Amino acid sequence: MSEHGFHVHGPHDHELEHAAQGHGNSFTNKVAMFTAIIATVGAIFGYMGGATQAAAGLYKNDAAIKKTEASNQWNYYQAKSSKQNLMELALELAPSSKADYYKGQIERYKTEKADIKTAAEKLETQSKEFDEMSEAQMHQHHRWAQATTVLQVAIALAAIALLTRKVWVEYAMFGTGALGIAIGILAALHI
């Protein structure tokens, strides 16, 4: 209000005053409240979807690293096998006075290969575990994405309900919102 008693306010202010005085439309208030709640829940679901997608990518990256490390171990295993084969050939061709040396080398390579094989198999198992964790995260990501999409449809139905003032659209809006929340619960439960 100005000093001279002249008061100007916009349509938004006018609507707020009417709502505060109890003149608000119950249908409009219901739909607006629903939209605000569903938009908030949808934002949380969207965040969770992004987080699970990022986690899936990290697990997939870890799987690739472990697979590369396993491959390196198998290459090392092959190198030891080649050296063992050379020692076996040398044992056959060398004089008997050198036989003990080559037999010792052959045994050494066999022992080293066994350790390398164990390490390579362990790395392959870790790679598989990371792949499985990535798949689980992607499944959960898809659930979050489905929930977010259904909630976006519910918000669109809310806009249609406001424009058409059709009760059946309002029911569809509430039903779609409930379905979106149910799918979000499934995502949270890893189902």
Image (cartoon, helix red, strand yellow):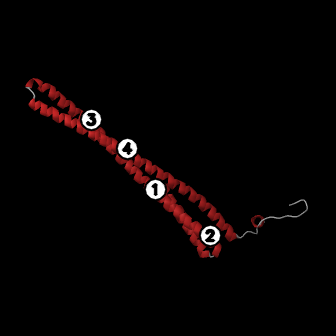
What is the CA distance from the residue labelled 1 to the residue labelled 2? Answer: 29 Å
Q: Quadrant of residue 22?
A: bottom right
Pinpoint residue 179: horizontal percent, then vertical percent: 52, 65
Question: Label 4 belongs to which residue?
Answer: 65
Residue located at (13% from left, 31% from top): 90
Q: Amino acid at mark 3?
A: Asp
Residue located at (88% from left, 64% from top): 6
Q: Report helix, strand or loop for mark 1.
A: helix
What is the CA distance from the residue labelled 1 to the residue labelled 4? Answer: 23 Å
At label 1, counting other C-alpha atoms closer than 10 Å, the crowd grade (few under 14, some 14-19, many 20 or more) is many
Q: Report helix, strand or loop for mark 4.
A: helix
At label 3, counting other C-alpha atoms closer than 10 Å, the crowd grade (few under 14, some 14-19, many 20 or more) is few
Pinpoint residue 121: horizontal percent, then vertical percent: 29, 42
Query: Which marked residue is nearer to the observer: mark 1 or mark 4?
Result: 4
Q: Is residue 56 above or below residue 101?
A: below
Q: Earlier in the sequence, mark 3 or mark 4?
A: 4
Pinpoint residue 9: horizontal percent, then vertical percent: 80, 64
Question: Label 1 belongs to which residue?
Answer: 140
Query: Which marked residue is nearer to the observer: mark 4 or mark 2?
Result: 4
Residue 115, numbered label: 3
